Amino acid sequence: MIHKKIYFVYFSPTGTTKKVLNTMMKVINGESVAHDFTPFHAKYETIRFEQQDILVIGFPVYSGRVPATFTERIALLEGNNTPAIIVATYGNRDYDDALIEMKSLLTGREIMPIAAAAFVTEHNMCPKIATGRPDNNDLQEIALFTSRAFEQIKSIEYPKYYDLHVKGDSNYRDYLLMPMQPHSAENCNHCGICANLCPAGAIPLESPQQTDNERCIRCMRCIRVCPVQARKLTEQQKLGAEKHLSKYMIYRHNETFLCNK
Ligand SMILES: Cc1cc2nc3c(=O)[nH]c(=O)nc-3n(C[C@H](O)[C@H](O)[C@H](O)COP(=O)(O)O)c2cc1C
């Protein structure tokens, strides 16, 4: 089958997932279009895919799951037995049920996962975990996976249904949030960049030095985008994350899955 358009849809508060998808984009030939589903203050519209299109969907693992904020936005995707590649990035602890959850979300939208990957990346709450990943070796593995996944998609036959097997338990893990809400320090100049880019609308546009802790999803984006480093975690929060994650300072390998033909 000749494929028409390749869609890259992603949620990437601190940019690592976007980097992985950009690497994939460079490998493929064909017309591609990217949709960033990260900001809260954006005008989102339904995206309808045809059977001949391909969807690549990327997200970071949160608490072993698909981030709930992204789950809500996935309701805007409408497939038509459209083949998809699932890409999860995770900070070297585990990706638990994230792939199986995304598989189910997509299947429910008439999108058919054909390939999936869980790539190890530096942990954005504690950069001592998986520091510098994806590294050059990871980027090569990402490129190889991309070629294999697209080859697999090229060879699918309709109307056959392909059931992709991925790791995970369909009784999803409970969604737990660490007490890691960033705050604004005194040098905040109220520029509003963090408020505009927050994925959860947790920073009021009119008073960006505040944080709505109920809405905050602890994604660390405000810390990453602040031009004067005014958004911060406390030393206690940083030490808490380090203590909690220290047992994951081991090397973990990327994992990939392709459906059986
Ligand atoms: C709220 C939150 C929860 C996270 N949960 C996990 C997890 O369960 N397992 C893991 O290995 N990494 C976890 N991480 C690390 C991210 O998955 C990882 O840093 C990811 O690459 C960030 O992607 P991004 O840069 O595209 O936002 C978590 C990060 C955050 C902010």
Image (cartoon, rainbow, N blue to C red):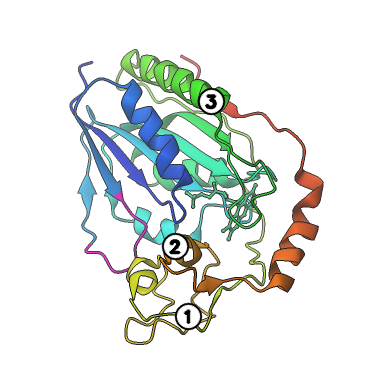
Q: Quadrant of residue 146?
A: top left
Report the side of 102 relative to 128 (left or right): left
At horizontal 54% and vertical 42% (from top left) the residue drawn is 89
User: x and y percent of residue 178 in the render?
Assistant: 67, 67
Crowd around label 2: few <14 · some 14–19 · many ≥20 (10 Å): some
Bounds of the magenta segment = 36-43
Residue type indicated by callout 3: Asn
Left or right, residue 155 beside residue 138 = left
Asked if ligand 1 lies within 8 A of label 1, the reply is no
* Lower position in the chain sequence, tag 2 or tag 1: 2
Which disc, if any, is residue 187? 1
Q: Quadrant of residue 63?
A: bottom right
The amino acid type, in three-letter code, at marker 2 is Thr
Q: Position of residue 156 (x, y in %)?
A: 35, 17
Above or below, comparing residue 53 to residue 212 in the picture: above
Please report contact status of discs 1 and 3: CB closer than 8 Å, yes or no. no
Residue at image coords 49%, 31%: 116
Q: Which mark is residue 20?
A: none
Residue on which the image places disc 3? 136
Q: Is residue 137 left or right of residue 55?
A: right
Looking at the image, tell me whether mark 2 or mark 3 is earlier in sequence order: 2
Is residue 261 inside the magenta stretch? no
When asked about the image quadrant of residue 85, the answer is top left
* Residue 219 spot, x, y in % from top left: 52, 62
Q: Which residue is mark 2?
A: 69
Mark 1 and mark 3: Cα distance apart in space: 37 Å
Camera-nearest residue between 177 and 163: 177
Closer to viewer: mark 1 or mark 3: 1
